[in-house]
Each structure stands twice: as structure tokens, then as C-alpha cells.
Image: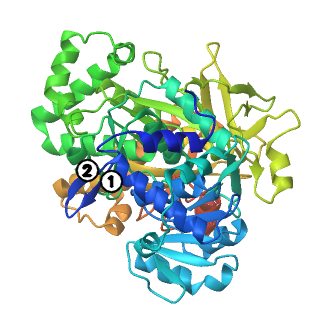
Amino acid sequence: MPIRTLSELIGATLRRDKPDCFLHKVDGRYVPIPTREFAARVRRLAAALDAAGVRPGDRIAQMAENGPHWPTVDFAALALGAVHVPIYPTLLPEGAAYIVRDSGARILFVQGAERTAGLVGVRDQMPSVERIVVIGEPPLADGVTGFEELLAGAPEIPDAQFDAWLARARPEDLATLIYTSGTTGDPKGVMLTHGNLASNVEASCKALAIQPGWTALSFLPLAHSFERTVTYIYLNLGVSIAYAESVQAVAQNLAEVRPHIFVSVPRIYEKVMARAWETARAAGGLRHAIFRWAVKVGRQHVADRIAERPPSLRLRIADKLVFAKIRARLGGRFEMAASGGAPLARDVAEFFWGAGVRIFEGYGLTETSPVLTVNRPRRARLGSVGEAIEGVELRIAEDGEILARGPGIMRGYFGKPEATAEVIDADGWFHTGDIGNLDADGYLFITDRKKELLVNAYGKNIAPAPIENALKESRWISQAVVVGDRRQYLSALIVPDFEALRTWAAGQGIAGEPATLIAEPRVRALVAADVAAVNSRLARYEQVRNWDLLPAEFTLEGGELTPTLKVKRRVINSKYKELLDRLYADAEAGAG
């Protein structure tokens, strides 16, 4: 039966007899959690929250890493009709306090001693919080309750009582407030209903051939709508979910879990591809030549991979010599992956599809629950983000903005009716802020963010993302941010691929420290050649006229990236203002 609310999904999930609903690392090995154990903890936590006075509509916040505790809190809150408020675990205490305060959360679940201490330190900024519950640690301060202590003190409730709580939910009921990470300004609470999310789960399940009995590896933050909705999709279909220890441990966890499926953002795929190339180059000689040949063959057979046609003799040889090893690093049972959160460069997509690693790119926003479009098996169109899922309408406005309408569109921004009216018009069309186009077959292509379009001194609109993606195709470039709003020409801040440069520098007798590498004339010559190659394919007004190298990557911790690894242009422009001003001053003086 189709689900109409998340409570119906919860009920179906908890009734399923599955010995490995979740898997998590305990004492160095993955341990399964059967559904009956998960269900017992959800029921007990729901009873504890009910005894604490939590009622339908109350907000329950959670700041934690991925793990089985995450859906336990989520399901218990939803079962009671409460509103779950996820908080990115990487936020500073003041940022987390803003979300708690803005949402009016009554109870705050937080994982770890350091986060708990930080939030206790800003408790006066969270007046609505009645109780802080710490996950995985003993109570650390007055007014802080241990998670296991809370469960142990829960009253016993009959199954009929829990089922009655679940039965209260209606599609129009608010299920969650997800605060947008925001590349500018304060985050806004996106109000998503049970119906918003349930409809997205149903339509996404129909679009992708995900099979019951598969195992998924979860490593994107569950605080983000993409991984969270994907989790609901997995549970709806009976897919086991294994939690990665961290993003840094994903390579090891892939080998341990041997997943059939996972989802990620483009930055992760870019890094995996760059590492594969660098490993081949370091091997040198025949191995490097074979790798280059195999990648070329793979790219020539992308259409065959998509259509699932039998491989040619050349492709079978490339598989045996190179691609089978790449797929083996994914655990040996890999079936498919999904990409979202930002556009996946076509070069990256072709590399993986050519290698037999199927990555289905999709598109959506937190405000759309989140999936709007996705590429389907046997009819993926690389470079696009696919076709609209069932129930979603798409339209391109006169200025190129993508508009969407459908059952997954948010109710609005919490407590911000003016901001809501700015993005949802009178006819129910949500204005995505993205620029794109639809082809004759209904495939959507994203070109840039509307607010990130650069307008040069001559009034030309320039989309920076395609230029940045072209620069990142260079062996020597890891990240690039193009600037030039209201300037006569474009400049770029470039972060080199230091792993690739160190390998090269070792053969040149050059020290491998980042500060040394970015100042080395021969390194700058390598980058300059690739920038020039990109410029040769661009219109004059799109060309990067001046650039400089940075000694460290843009990071989430440094404030330059959102939790989904999108660039915060406003932050970068501010943080590197002196460098950018000098770049333009040098060029205008004839020195650049």
C-alpha cells in the first residue's frame, strides 16, 4: 500500500522481521541491529518523551553523527506527532543554539561530550529547552540526561498505545524543520509535512530500481534532507543501512560492508576519480598506459553501459585489466549510486559510467523534500539531472530560473511568511533559484545558481560553475572559485591537487609542502597551461584573466563550504578580499 504519512512508513518498518535493519561498528566490527531491537528502542523512547510532556507539534532537536540513534530519535518524535529538528553536527554551539532557539525546541538530543559541553555553555541562548539528552556519554552537567538513562526510566506502554499514536498523523501535519545551511544569511527552517516527505519517498521508489534485501552505506549527514529522505526510501523498501564511521573511513567501510548502493555529493566522486588517476600515474609505465587506454575505451562505451548492452571485447578487456579493480574497491556487490546536492561534472560522470559504476544524478532542494528529478536506469542522460519524478511539474521562467510544483513543495519557512512568499508564488510554483533548461524529452539541465551569476562591468551575465568545473578537470587543480562580479574580467582562486603535485615534485627535486609548491614557478607554469587550455574553449568575457594559488583546501571547518560541500562565495569573497583586490590591482597595473 502507498504510504501517505511517515507514521505509516514507521509502522511498516517496525513490523518487518529483518535481522539486519541497521549495521554499525562496535569494537572494530560491523554488528547488525534487528528490527525488533530497533522497534523496542523507538517505542521506549516515544514513551519517555510522552511521559516528559511532549505533545503533537512540539519540536525535538537532534545534533548527532549518523548512527542507529539518529532514526531512533527521529521515529520516536514522529510517532508522537512531534516535529523533528535536525542540526548539523559540525555547527559551532552558537549556530546550533540559533536553530534550537528559532525552532523553539523543547528537548535537545546531542551526541558526544564536546558538543554537549559547548551547548551547555550557550544554554542561556536556548530558552525553550527543558532538557538536554546526551547520546553515548554519561550525564555531564546539571540538567543533562543520559540517553540510556532516559530509556531506562520510560514507562511500559502497550503496543496498541504506540499504534494509536502512529494513527493520529495526517499528511498535512508538520513532520520536520530542516534548517537550510545557507550560502548567505541566517539559516531558515524549512517546514516539511508528512505528506511532503511520504510523496517524495513513494515517487523516488518508483523512479529507481532499488531492490529489497540490498545493503546501503550511509555517510552523508542525516541532518541533510538528501540522506534523510534516502534513508526513508531504504527503510520503505527493506534495504539494510550500514553507517560509515566517518567520511574519512568510507574507503575502509566500503570493503567491510560491501554495499549495493550509496548516495553522495559530487565532491566525493571527484576525489575518488582524482585518486584513481594519481595512483595510475604514480605506477607509471605500462600500468599508466593501460589505465589511460581503459578510461578511453570506457568513455567510448558509456551509451552501452547506460543501455545495459553486453560489453564489447575491448570493454571486457578494459574491465578485466582496470575497471574490475575500481569496482572491487566498492566492496564487490556494488549496483548503483546517486549524486545530488550540486551538479556532477560530465567528465566525472563519464569516468564512472565507463568503469561500470552507475551514478544516477538527480536534483532537488531541501524545500522540495528534496527530490524533483532523477535519471533512471537504462535511460540516464549524462550532463542532465534527469526527468521529473511522479507528481512534479517543471517550468523554466523567462529569466531561465527553474520553477517546480508538486506534492513535495514545503509548507514554507518557519516563522518567515515574507521569505516564503518570495519563493512560492500565488500559483504554487516554487522558485528554485537555479538556472537551467529542459530538453525536448523533459530532461533537466542545470547551468548555475541565479544568485551566483556574475555580472561583469559590461553587463554580461556569466555562470561561474561551468568554468570552475572545466578548471577542476585539470590534473593539478582540486578546487576553483571564479570571481568577477562588477569587474572588467574574471579571476580565480585555485587550490592545487597537492597529492598529484607531491608525486610530480618528488621527481623534480622540489619539496612537497603546500607553501613551497604554490610559490614554485614550475608548479605555476603547470597550472597556467591548464588555465590557458580552459580559456581557449571559452568566450573572451568568460576567460579567467588572472588567478592565484591557495595553500589549503576550502573546508566546512574553515567556513568556506556548506555541510553539503557547496562553496560559500560570500565567505570566500570576504575571507580572501585582500588577495582578490591585489590580483585585480596587479593586473590593472600591468603586472598580472
Q: Is residue 278 at all visible to an observer of this figure?
A: no
Q: Earlier in the sequence, mark 2 or mark 1?
A: 1
Q: Residue at x 19, y 23 (%)?
A: 319
Which is nearer the eye, 314 or 96? 96
**Contact, mark 2 vs mark 1 (Cβ under 8 Å):** yes
**Which residue is disc 1 drawn over?**
244
The image position of residue 88, as x and y in percent, is 53, 62
Residue sitting at x 24%, y 45%: 257
Q: Where does residue 414 sit, x and y in percent of width and height?
A: 76, 57
- Placement of 314 over or under 352, stated as above or below: above
Q: Is residue 530 shown left or right of residue 320? A: right
**Residue 228 in view in this figure:** yes
Q: Which mark is residue 160?
A: none
Name the residue nearer the viewer: 589 or 368.
368
Going by the image, does 413 lie left or right of 161?
A: right
Provide residue 320's location: percent of width, then percent of height.
14, 24
Kindly identify the residue that appears in the image at 23 percent across and 51 percent down.
Answer: 252
Q: Is residue 35 above or below residue 325?
A: below
561 in relation to 107, above or below? above
- What amino acid is found at the position of numbered circle 2 in the picture? Asn
Q: Which residue is mark 2?
A: 253
Under tag 2, what secondary structure?
helix
